[in-house]
Structures are given as structure tokens and as C-alpha cells.
Image (tube, rainbow, N blue to C red):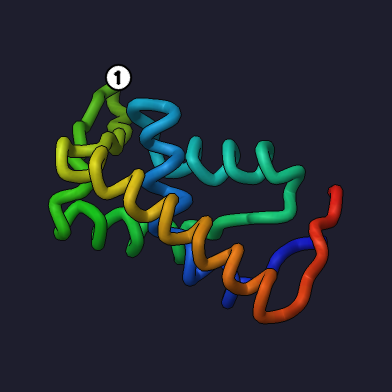
Amino acid sequence: MIYSSELIKGTLKTIVLKMLEDNVRMYGYEMTQKVKELTKERIQITEGALYPTLHMLEQEGLVTTELEYNGKRARKYYSLSPEGKSKTTERVNELADFMNTMKFLLDIKTQTA
């Protein structure tokens, strides 16, 4: 089952921040593939959703960028800023609390995948 874009949209900032926390620095395509791999393809992030999110996080001061050249090809790497590092924990905790609240609200019993 692939999760709907509506569900992913509300959690994408948190997913990106957590990916960067766990991997120090990544480029966009690498993030999409890592998320796909870790979720057994249940979450598939499109470039059309990822890059606006990365730009927004950069504008908010949570992410920094670094261009790296390999011959004529340039690759943009993203990393957490100091503020991004502290915000990641806050966002992950908020999402975890939200998921617990939704389980309670919808009367969902814990399931194993």
C-alpha cells in the first residue's frame, strides 16, 4: 500500500528534517530513494513535493545548502542548521504525539506491519 499524498504532505517537513538528522547531509534524489527504501515503498516522495519543502526549510533557517561540483555536474547538498537540529526533535515529538492522539481518536489498536 502506498500512502496518499495528503498524508505525506502533512508530514514531509518532519520526514526531511529527520532524514537530514540521521544522514548529516543529503541531496534531493538521495532523500527520495532513502525514504522509499526505509518504508518499503509505502512513502514515495515526488520531486515536485520535496524541492518546495527543502526551499521552505532553507528560508526558515532550518536547512543549509552546499553546492558540490563533480566535473561539470553540480549537486546541491542539504544539511541541518543548528536551529534545524533542535527543531527536528520538536517536530518528531509533535508528530509522535499526534499519531498517538489519532490512534486514540480513531480507536485503533496497535498493529504489527
| For residue 64, above or below residue 100 | above
State the image coordinates of residue 61 (x, y, percent, origin top left): 14, 51
State the image coordinates of residue 89 (x, y, percent, origin top left): 35, 44
Q: Which residue is mark 1?
A: 71
State the image coordinates of residue 25 (x, y, percent, origin top left): 34, 29
Comparing 26 with 11, the one in front is 11
Comparing 68 with 19, the one in front is 19
Q: Is residue 100 left or right of residue 107?
A: left
Quadrant location of residue 72? Answer: top left
| For residue 107, above or below residue 62 | below
Q: Is residue 102 left or right of residue 66?
A: right
State the image coordinates of residue 37 (x, y, percent, origin top left): 68, 38
Comparing 105 with 95, the one in front is 105
Q: Residue at x 66, y 38 (%)?
A: 38
Q: Residue at x 54, y 59 (%)?
A: 46
| For residue 70, above or below residue 44 | above
* Residue lying at the far top of the rendered structure: 71
Q: Residue at x 37, y 46 (%)?
A: 17
Q: Is residue 103 left or right of residue 71?
A: right
The crowding category of the residue bearing disc 1, from other C-alpha atoms within 10 Å (few below 14, some 14 to 19, many at least 20), is few
Q: Is residue 106 left or right of residue 31?
A: right
Quadrant location of residue 84? Answer: top left
Quadrant holding the N terminus: bottom right
Q: Residue at x 29, y 38 (%)?
A: 78
Q: Secondary structure at mark 1?
A: loop
* Residue lying at the far bottom of the rendered structure: 105
Kind of residue sitting beneath label 1: Gly
